[in-house]
Image (spheres, rainbow, N blue to C red):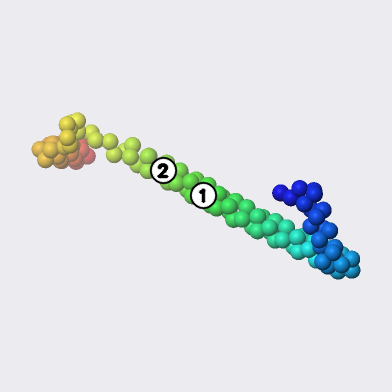
Amino acid sequence: MLQPGEILIILLLALVLLGPRRLPEIARKLGQWTAELRDAAREITKGLENEVSELRDAGNEIRGVGQELRKPLSDVNKGLDWKGPKPVSGPTPEDAMRDLEAIESNLESHEEEE
């Protein structure tokens, strides 16, 4: 940052080099350019904040959809519990055959009752 003494020296040099007539004109132009730069910076900042806000909203919406999709899947998984014996490393083909036979015999017994 410039200290007050340095600013005073720069202003005196500008007055000597530019003269008392041109110095106010140049100061006005410099002020206008500074204001334009500030406005542009504000617009850029506001645009970036809007974009970030839209991205956050989209992320929240996607998370909500994901949570909605998880609910039905967990309901479906509840109905798929294994009813057979607890396998150590997975069901064997013999277990599968026994289950099929039990299902067939249950179906036959239900058909006979009707």
Q: Amino acid at mark 2?
A: Arg
Q: Nearer the viewer, mark 1 or mark 2?
A: 1
Answer yes or no: do the residues labelled 1 and 2 have beta carbons within 8 Å? no
**In x, y percent, where is residue 77?**
33, 40
User: In terms of depth relative to the viewer, which is nearer, 58 or 103?
Assistant: 58
**Left-right relation of 22 to 53:** right
Residue 50 picture location, percent across and down: 62, 54
Q: Position of residue 41 (x, y in %)?
A: 68, 58
Judging depth in this view, the residue of 53 and 87 nearest the camera is: 53
Which of 33 and 12 lies nearest the eye of the viewer? 12
**Residue depicted at 13% across the width and 38% down the height:** 92
Mark number, residue 34: none
Answer yes or no: is residue 87 visible: yes
Q: Residues within 10 Å of mark 1 (few under 14, many from 20)?
A: few
Up-down: is 85 above or below 55? above
- Which quadrant of the figure has residue 101? top left
Q: Secondary structure at mark 1?
A: helix
Residue 5 drawn above or below residue 80:
below
Q: SS of the residue at dot 2?
A: helix
Identify which amino acid the numbered label 1 is placed on.
Gly
Q: Position of residue 61 (x, y in %)?
A: 52, 49
Considering every residue shown, the one lying at the far left of the view is 94
- Look at mark 1 in the image and give the residue it sits on: 59
Q: Is residue 85 above or below residue 32?
A: above
Q: Quadrant of residue 19?
A: bottom right
Q: Which residue is mark 2?
A: 70
Position of 22 with respect to 63 (left or right) is right
Q: Residue at x 62, y 52 (%)?
A: 49
The mark that comes first in sequence, 1 or 2, is 1
Q: Residue at x 89, y 66 (%)?
A: 20
- Residue 108 visible within the image: no
